Amino acid sequence: MAANSDMRLVIAGAGGRMGRTLVAAIAAAKGMTLAGATEAAGSPFIGRDVGELSGLGPNGVTIGDNAAQLVKDADGLIEFTVHTATPVLAELTAAAGIVHVIGTTGHTAAEEEAIAQAAKRIPIVKSGNMSLGVNLLAALVKRVAQALNENYDVEILEMHHNKKIDAPSGTALMLGRAAAAGRGINLNAHSVRGRDGLTGARRAVDIGFASLRGGSVVGDHTVIFAGPAERIELTHRAEDRMIFARGALHAALWARGQKPGLYSMADVLGLADI
């Protein structure tokens, strides 16, 4: 399709909280239109009008389970689904030659590799968090970690609603990678995911994670730099899922003009070198 025409987007996971929010965001945005909505086979949302489900009123777009067919007539796909679905969707978008925006988290190493392989054929934007504020926070975390020595312990606290299925959150891990990059260390080798019992003294090089779940919390994240007699805390609190939806739409429009590759929101927002 012509680059100056509205971008036709398919939403995968359209029946979920973020899927519904994305449908509403597209309806309110300029330069894009909803090309289709999908869910996993067997979902109770199959056959539902996605506009009605999203609180917009009927829009004539019915949720189906045939993503392969929908991507043939689209310019991009946005997904907030489950980690096992992403490699399948990435193969479909790569075969169709369209943009793929991934907000799904919790991928295994094998799934990450499958995504990277698909990105050799199409532009993929993948991020643990699509909001401007969180990505600015990650840039700040990296700079603070660079500025402070190992006398400042790094701990990351996150809280989400009681329906979230992975922990730590993708955003917490993104912030952890930013801190690790600032310190010049490998996060996998220095990540502490939980403490219980006689754990021994904390290692100065470790980056700790604590995950809380409850209620309807959209997403709270705090990065703590705890030093001798002082503490620096950098916090972001998400109050509405619409911030993630708008970020995902911005990423899709940005990616439409990019070469194949695996990009992050830092690339989209021009923060990659900060």
Image (spheres, rainbow, N blue to C red):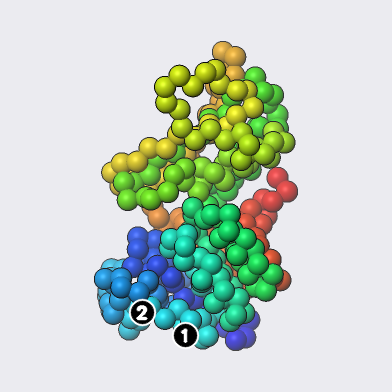
Question: Mark 2: which amino acid?
Answer: Gly
Instruction: From the top left corner, tell me how far across and down residue 251 is, in percent.
Output: 57, 64
Q: Assign the N terminus to one quadrant of the image.
A: bottom right
- Give the spatial CA distance, label 2 vs label 1: 10 Å
Q: Indicate left or right for 165 with 86 as reference.
A: left
Crowding around mark 2 (Cα neighbors within 10 Å: few <14, some 14 to 19, many 20+) is many
Q: Is residue 9 above or below residue 105?
A: below
Residue found at x 62% / y 86%: 2
Instruction: From the top left corner, tell me how far across and down residue 130 is, in percent.
Output: 52, 55
Q: Are marks 2 and 1 in contact (CB under 8 Å)?
A: yes
Q: How many marks?
A: 2
> In terms of secondary structure, where does tag 1 sit?
helix
Q: Indicate left or right for 237 with 153 as reference.
A: left
Circle on res. 93: none
Q: Assign the C terminus to one quadrant of the image.
A: top right
Foreground pick, 90 / 133: 90
Q: Determine which quarter of the picture holds residue 47.
A: bottom left
Instruction: From the top left corner, tell me how far across and down residue 218 is, in percent.
Output: 38, 48
> In terms of secondary structure, where does tag 2 sit?
strand
Residue found at x 26% / y 71%: 44
Q: Can residue 74 be seen here?
A: yes
Circle on res. 69: 1
Instruction: From the top left corner, tell me how far across and down residue 115 is, in percent.
Output: 60, 64
Circle on res. 64: 2
Foreground pick, 180 / 241: 180
Mark nearer the N terminus (2 vs 1):
2
Question: Mark 1: which amino acid?
Answer: Gln
Foreground pick, 91 / 131: 91
Q: Is residue 92 above or below residue 243?
A: below
